[in-house]
Each structure stands twice: as C-alpha cells, then as structure tokens.
Amino acid sequence: MKNLTPAKVSLMMFGVIGFLVFAFIAKRMFAVDEPVPEVTTRNVPMLVSEVAEGTTITANHLGLGPINVKDLTPDILLSNRAIVGRIAKSKIPAATPLRADLLYQYGERPDPKMSDEMRLVSVSLVEAVSMVDGLIKPNQYVDVHMSTTGQESRDERLKGGLTLTLFRGVRVVAINGSFSQGQIDSSGNNVTLEMTQEQVNIMIQAQKHGGITLTYNPSGKGDGGLALDARDRITLEQILGLKPIEKPAPPYLAEIFRGASREEVYFENGKRNSRRVDRGLRNSNDYGPQSNDASGSGSTTDSGTTSPEAQGTNNQQPVPNQDSPSA
C-alpha cells in the first residue's frame, strides 16, 4: 500500500476503461442478429357461447380468439361490423371463426317453420309482464288472455271489467322478430304466434278492443280451438264479491179524462213523480183531426182511440190504489 501512488491509481483506471472498450468492440464485431419471430396467429371475432339457429348476433355474443394465419380463408369474417345484426343459419359452436356462409345476409330472415293449415299473427304487448316478464321463449306454448280496457269496460254487461281465456297451447314462433330468445324491452314487445285461421280472426279483434296477456303453458300444444266456457272468464264484480245493482222499475203513466180535461199522472217506484193537467181540449188538435163520419162518432186521440167527448164517458187507466186521485 506504501507503493500505491496517485499516478499508479490513475494508470489502473485507464487500463480498466480501455479493457471495457476493447471488450465492447469485440462483442459488436462477433455479435449475430437474433431472428425476429414469425407471426403465426391472428385474433378474429368468435362467439363466446354457442348460439342456436335463428339467433340474431349482437355485440354481446362476440369476442376475440386466435387463429393460425395459415388457416385463414377468404370467407372468414374479420370484423364485428360484418357480423352484428345477422342471423345464424344453423347452430354455431363457441370459439370458432365465423364464416360468411354460417349467417344470413343483412336484412335476410329465415322462413318460419309451420304446417300448411296454420297461420302467423303478431301481437303487440305493452309491458314485459304481459309475457311472464320475458321468460317465454320461441317454440314454447302459451295461453292467450284478453282483458277489456277503456270504453269497453264501462259497458254494463261487462260488470266493471272482464278477463277471459281465449286460447290454450299456442306456439310462440318469434319474439321481436327473433326466432331465439333475445333481449326483451320493458316498454313494449311484439310476439308472433302460430294459430288456426279461426283463431287469427278472433285474435285480431281481441287486440283491437282489449289488452292481451300471455301465460306459460307447460302442457304443450292445444286443440287449436276457442276456450270460452264459464270457468275461463271472470268479472270485477265476481272478484270483489259484489251483487248486481238492481234496476229501477220503469215509470207508470195513468191518463184520466174528465169531460173536456185530460190529466196525466206519472208514478215511479210506487210514488207519484210528476203531474200534468190539460184543460179545454174539446176543440184542440190534441185529440187528433175531426172525423167526417156521417154517424158523428167524434174525434180520435193521437194514439188513434176515440176521444172521451165522443164516447160520452170518462176513460181512466188503472193506477196504484194508494196514489189514485179522487174523481
């Protein structure tokens, strides 16, 4: 340590630096460039879960998955914009590239599957609760109910409102134009039902004059007829246990003739309600035109009966005894 001088320390430092510079230059001279790895895969849109035939593809159905570049073909769809809104032609498994021939073109829809004697009719439901809060799916069976609304409920024959079962076991073909279960709107949905021609005519009238409700029927297909017996309908009066309001008896009219005077007395609910007295009608037209009969039978009343003056007697219709006027 006694021989270590500042000059020697400086010399040692320069030596170390020179060695490092030499080593760096030598490494660069003999270095070999590492090969860049070749890209062999690419991410393409794929379904995150299996979809059934007739499903309308939405953005929620799609994700990204890798595919070998060598396996790419011109018919594989590479963008979500080319997929969203199209309908599956058949069942498509998850995590597989989507080819153009697996989907219908934009605006194209599959033909509904139904027998020749059946018809399709769409029903507009205002609320999701009218279709079991959206739990109903296409190809399931439902019962169709009608409830009177608006002016129809004020009809006395409906007794405050009426709900009845129209059909049982009707197949649901599509909901909001989709042949598979999809998104349900809380503000309104359209349900397409398979019915007979007779049922279609009734359904068209029913939805014009009342509210429609669908209920799930686990029993399956119905007989295709109309379900309208006593147990399939209920009124508001029956639910509340109210008795029908008795209608008042119609007013009773008594006409009393005294000489040249006519008296009309009205009775309603057993009581005298109103009274009108006409006097001096011998020469008036109240009894109708004078007769030209040679026998001098006299004039006739408005109703075509002979006036009491011509008969020479008083004509009095029967009236209730308790309110009968004195002669």
Image (cartoon, rainbow, N blue to C red):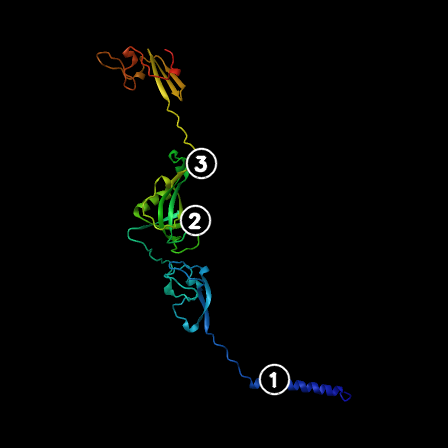
Mark 1, residue position: 24
Depicted 168 relative to depicted 52: above or below? above
Is label 2 or label 3 in front? 3
Q: Is residue 28 visible?
A: yes
Q: What secondary structure is found at the residue carrying circle 2? A: helix
Mark 2, residue position: 132
Depicted 51 relative to depicted 74: above or below? above
Depicted 89 relative to depicted 250: above or below? below
Which numbered disc, 1 or 3, marks the residue that appears first in the sequence? 1
Figure quadrant of residue 67: bottom left
Between marks 1 and 3, how big is the CA–CA gap? 100 Å
Give whichever of 178, 32 is nearer the camera: 178
Figure quadrant of residue 298: top left
Mark 1 belongs to which amino acid? Phe
Residue 261 position within the rendered picture, expressed as x and y whole percent measured from the top left:
34, 13
The residue carrying pointer 3 sits among few (fewer than 14), some (14 to 19) or many (20 or more) residues within 10 Å by Cα, namely: few
Q: Is residue 285 visible?
A: no
**Which residue appears farthest toward the left when viewing the image?**
294
Q: What secondary structure is found at the residue carrying circle 1? A: helix
Is label 1 or label 3 in front? 3
Residue 147 position within the rendered picture, expressed as x and y whole percent measured from the top left:
40, 41
Which label number is shown at residue 240? 3
Residue at image location 46% in from the left, 67% down from the top = 65
- The answer to whether the residue labelled 2 contacts the one labelled 3, judged by CB atoms less than 8 Å apart, is no
Which numbered disc, 1 or 2, marks the residue that appears first in the sequence? 1
